[in-house]
Amino acid sequence: MEKDKKTEVITMDVLARMVAKGFSAVDKRLDGVDKRLENHDKIFQVILKEMQGYNKEAKEHRMTMSSLNHSDITHELEIEGLKIRVQKLEQNFK
């Protein structure tokens, strides 16, 4: 006993409809992706602007700290010099 196999003739028109149906399913799945990507682009632009602001502030802080460190070192050297002079003066009075 052989099973009856149904063979269906597929024409180019049928194949074209199958492909079109597949593409329409993909279009439905990807329908809102463009809008979401646009929102992501806007959000990334805001984040980029904030990061650039933080980088600018960090640079200004580094510049300020650099000048403060320089003046701090200068003051420490002056104080050390004064301590040595005071020690010499104290030794002279003893």
Image (spheres, rainbow, N blue to C red):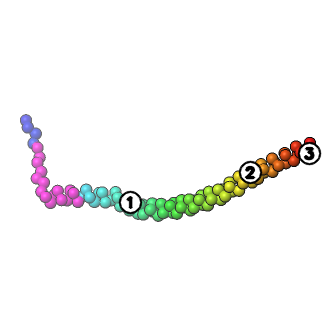
> Which residue is identified by label 1?
33
Residue 4 lies within the magenta run: no
Residue 66: x and y in percent read: 64, 56
Is 41 on the left or on the right of 78, as rendered? left
Which residue is drawn at the image coordinates 50% and 61% (left, top)? 48
> Which residue is identified by label 3?
93
Question: Tag on residue 77?
Answer: 2
Closer to the camera in the image, 92 or 14: 92
Q: What amino acid type is highlighted by mark number 1?
A: Val
Closer to the camera in the image, 62 or 4: 62
Is 80 on the left or on the right of 42, as rendered? right
Distance, label 1 to label 3, CA atoms, is 88 Å
Which residue is drawn at the image coordinates 19% and 59% (left, top)? 17
Residue 71: x and y in percent read: 71, 56
Distance, label 3 to label 2, CA atoms, is 25 Å
Q: Mark 3 or 2, which is nearer the eye?
A: 3
For this orientation, the residue located farthest to the front is 92
Residue 19 lies within the magenta run: yes
Closer to the camera in the image, 56 or 71: 71
Which residue is drawn at the image coordinates 84% and 46% (left, top)? 88
Q: Local crowd at mark 1 within 10 Å, few (<14), some, or many (≥20)?
A: few
Q: Quadrant of the N terminus?
A: top left
Closer to the camera in the image, 11 or 34: 34
Q: Which residues are magenta?
A: 5-20
